[in-house]
Amino acid sequence: MRYFSLAVVAVLLSVAPGYSQKGKKTAVAGPIDIKGKTNAEALALLIPGMARAELPDRNAPQQQWQEICLAAGAPGNEAKRLEVCKLMIAKLGADVPDPARFWMLKQLEYIGRAESVATVAKVIEDPSEVLRESAIRCLANNPAEEATAALVGKLSAKDAKTKIALANALGYRRAASAVNALAGELTNESPAVAQAAARALGRIASADAAAQLNKARAAAKDPVRLWICDAYLLCADKLVKDGKTQEAAAIYNDLYGNEKNRATRMAALEGVLRSAVDDAGAQIVKLLISDDRDARNIALLSIAGINSNSLKAVAAAADKLPVQAQVLLLGALANRREKSQAALALKASQSSDADLQRAGILALGSLGDASALPLLVETAFSKSKNADAARNSLGAIAGPGVDEKLVAILAAEKQPSTRIGLIATVEARGLATAVPALLENARGDDAAVRQAAMKALGKLAEAKDVGAMIPGILKAAKGAERENAEKAIAAVVARIGEPENRADAIVAAVSPENRAELLPLLGRIGGPKALALAKQSLDTKDRSAAVLAFANWPDYSVSDVLLDLAKNAPEPELKKLAFQNLARVNSLDKDHPVPPRFAVLKQAMAIADDVEKKKAVINALSTIREMEALRIAVSFLDDKQLNQAACKTIVELAHSKTLRQPNQAEFGRVLDRVLVICRDKELIERAKKYKANQ
Amino acid sequence: MKIPITTSRRRFIKAAGAAIAGPYLLTNAALGQGNRPPASDRIVMATIGCGGQGRGDMGGFMGHPEVQMVAVCDPVTAHREQARAAVNRRYNNNDCRAYNDFREVLARPDIDAVLIATPDHWHAIITIEACKHGKDVYCEKPESLTVREGRAMVEAVRRYGRVFSGGSQRVLGDYGNGDVPRMIWSGGIGTPREAFVSCGGPPSDCNLPELPVPAGVDWEMWLGPAPWRGFHPQLINFNFRPYREYSGWQMTDWGAHRFGAALFATQHHLTGPTRIHVPGPEHRLLTFEFADGFKMYHGGSGNITYVGTEGQWPGNHRRPDRLADMPHYKGRGGIFGDFLHCVRTRERCFRDVEIAHRACTVCHLGNIAYALNRSLRWDPVREEIIGDEEASRRLDRPKREPWTL
């Protein structure tokens, strides 16, 4: 309902401004008042509107009349439909403006029946090509048999263009009674007309159409012959749909055996296989070992659709096929997800032929079961050339017991490199059941294994597992491993619905001994409980860790703490760290209210005492969509050390249309300067675009 | 028995059809570049439809070393020349040919596959013609303009033994590497009962002013099978989609992605709804109702929301204990890599033509229901609207001569 009623509005809006030929914005004429009018009165009122001089102005009256027609065409409204159609056919004469006639023909295309045919058929001879075309389309979609008769009656037209349109229309409506008339055009001297007739007969695809096409085929020459064959194939396809498989097979075999054109023969071969049903398997095997590569390809594609008996026949003969055919056959079986042929894939995966072995390993991903896992694991994490194929299959293999066995293999595996690979596998598979094994690996002695396990836990663990992940943090070496481990826990707690509870498990685990280790993690999580603990810790021996926690904070809520530290911390390193992150947290959330963030950044600029600090603030200004932010950035354009950062911020601010467009003149002047100063090609291109108000 | 398979793999899998009579020739400049496969293993392609999407896809295909792009085609000179320049830059030569008429491209025997990125009203005709000429097809979404077009595409692809991939990378790509569909296939929300699919609305009639055709635009060819109307620049510069003469607007543009994704994730991708309810007192949103009781809605927050018997996504889904066997891309490099793999192996693509057709059918039925403002009954096996003749007439459109399916 919403879209129906909005359709008119949408059109009006879409054409409302800016489409005048002279580039002048024009108002679009609106609907006409037809409230309380009969349909006849409404149509009389709407016709002039449907033919208004400007196309956009026609829209409202057109849609008004269309709504009436759509309602009249609904099931059970026959009397109303007939009334509306009769009103329109009375107005299809040349005394009515063409645009209105065009629109009424469009309505009749969907709701007209027998009553409309004679009048619409007259329009096929109208001087207007648009109306002629529209009338033919209208009759093509009219279900009344009278429409077929009318279209056939016009088929004697002299010009090829009209003949083609009429033939297409008869094909469109699958008009069985038009077969003889169309067959007469198969020998038309114009190949285009003959082609249209052939295609129409192909769409009709009745027994009569097939007979006529076959009759014409004998004497036809290319290119018409190709079209006749194509249409004849369509007739055979229709026979298959109707369950007349043998009759279809006769056509396919005839075309495959007797036609010279390669495309025709291959399409016929596809039909031969499709109609062979239980015998398709044996024929596919023959084709797979033939010299005809096109036929082999058809056979391969046909495997997707054959029945189980035929499939068994193909599988039984697999050993006898050449290696390259076996490779492709395995792909086809895998594509069918034909698990009954898992043994074939397993056998191939142990072949001495490299191609076949690889194909077997790949096919196990779709066909294999739990018994294939040892082989896949051994290959996947070895130096084998097929390791990538095995990893691929390990990611895809599915079935009873597969995931349980994978987790058991991970739990029992000793080799670190294999464990890492298995961890990546269970991570990619998203297996929650692997969490206990991952926790065990996360607190082990091998750093690479620990890192892989924590990464996987970040994706798979739940809130209840966070406590058990903390030993993984404590075990992680400081630096990249520790940071990644912290990010993994942060990812897990981010899935807790209530933000204020996200730090609970970690806060509960904090002790004087591990506080310094866990504060940076708490900083990544944020929230009131973490904030309280971090603030308390500023006056303890763990002050540095507390500052690091604030430096990691995920939102701007610690601005005041960071600003205070940036101003007053006695330790130079902590002061610098606080400053850098002051700028960072105030540029994190662009949707957060601007005034408080802007105020903090202005204070930060005031205390920035070196180039890097100033650059950090200038960069952060790009998130403040205020003209004052722009002007501050502009003030650095003459500073050789800061002007590139200023250019970047100016371009980012210009990206905001809501800021730029009301201030396009000022932005234009600033962007001119950026184009002179900036050295970054991408920024220059963007600046040009924004300057042109794009 | 000794089998005389001595040809290269490319020759082994070379397309069926009359158009493959002779070996193709590549210039010396195109041979032996860096790590590219030898010419005998390359897949020779052409791009038909060289607007922004076409050029983007073309760049994606050219990023695969086995692809040799040799031709571009567009009735807008500026588009095709931009595309030709991009191809020539990529290969550092001047070998790419530019065409106005796709039929000339399809007639070239050296081309294995075509990328179709034309406006939607051309997709079916070019796909079907390409199949007849022995070409494999990668066709941008929405793959069809009407339900009947979609079925005709399926039949042509099958009849001529071609490989087809639709161009919706978002069925898997929007959700990690298919993580969400796989979670749902694996029971992460129990049995899916509902999906809320957010995309824009249906199209409207085109009443843009008619302007003189500028130089460098073959307007007749651009319109092709669509009803005749005068030129407007908006139409040739991507913004044809709001108008039903050429597209199904957002219902098919984004709907082909998102309804397709929801159908796939809930394993309804090879069937269709049985009822389509328009919004009203009984149904807040346009509702597609399936035979098994599953309901898919047009609307809701976010892109797609899935509700199952044991959870929902986004929200309280659980991580699966066992991974389901779910089809995925084959080969390397996402949906392009999947297509190229299947061209080599003759397997069916992830976005096979039947799956693409089923996704688009949902979009088209939604548009018909919106246009008529009434609910529909649909037979997904026979692909027929039940008991509404006017609605049934909207399942297809007569095409302007000389074009027909």
Image: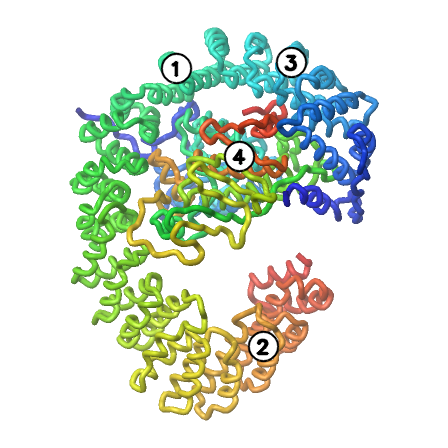
Q: Residues within 10 Å of mark 4 (few under 14, many from 20)?
A: many
Residue that numbered label 1 is attached to: A244
Q: Which amino acid lies under the numbered mark 4 shown in the image of this protein?
A: Ser
Name the residue carrying label 2. Answer: A597
Pointer 3 local density, CA inside 10 Å: few below 14, some 14–19, many at least 20: some
Q: Secondary structure at mark 2?
A: helix
In three-dimensional space, the C-alpha distance between marks 3 and 1, rounded to whole angstroms, equals 30 Å
Q: Are marks 1 and 4 in contact (CB under 8 Å)?
A: no
Q: Do circles 4 and 3 both sit on a common chain? A: no
Numbered marks: total = 4
Q: Earlier in the sequence, mark 3 or mark 1?
A: 3
Which chain is home to disc 1?
Answer: A
* Local secondary structure at mark 3: helix
Q: On the picture, is A132 further left or further right than B281?
A: right
Residue positioned 80% across, 36% down in the render: A36
State the SS at label 4.
Answer: loop
Name the quadrant containing residue B215.
top right
Answer whether residue B45 is visible to the viewer in this image. no
Check residue A146 in the rendering and tell me which mark sits there, or answer none: 3
Hey, what amino acid is under mark 2? Answer: Arg
The picture places residue B80, in percent across and down from the top left corner, at 57, 40
Q: Residues within 10 Å of mark 2 (few under 14, many from 20)?
A: many
C-alpha gap between disc 2 and disc 1? 77 Å
Q: Which residue is mark 4?
A: B144
For residue A132, which quarter of the picture? top right
Q: Of residues A284 and B251, which is closer to you in this image? A: B251
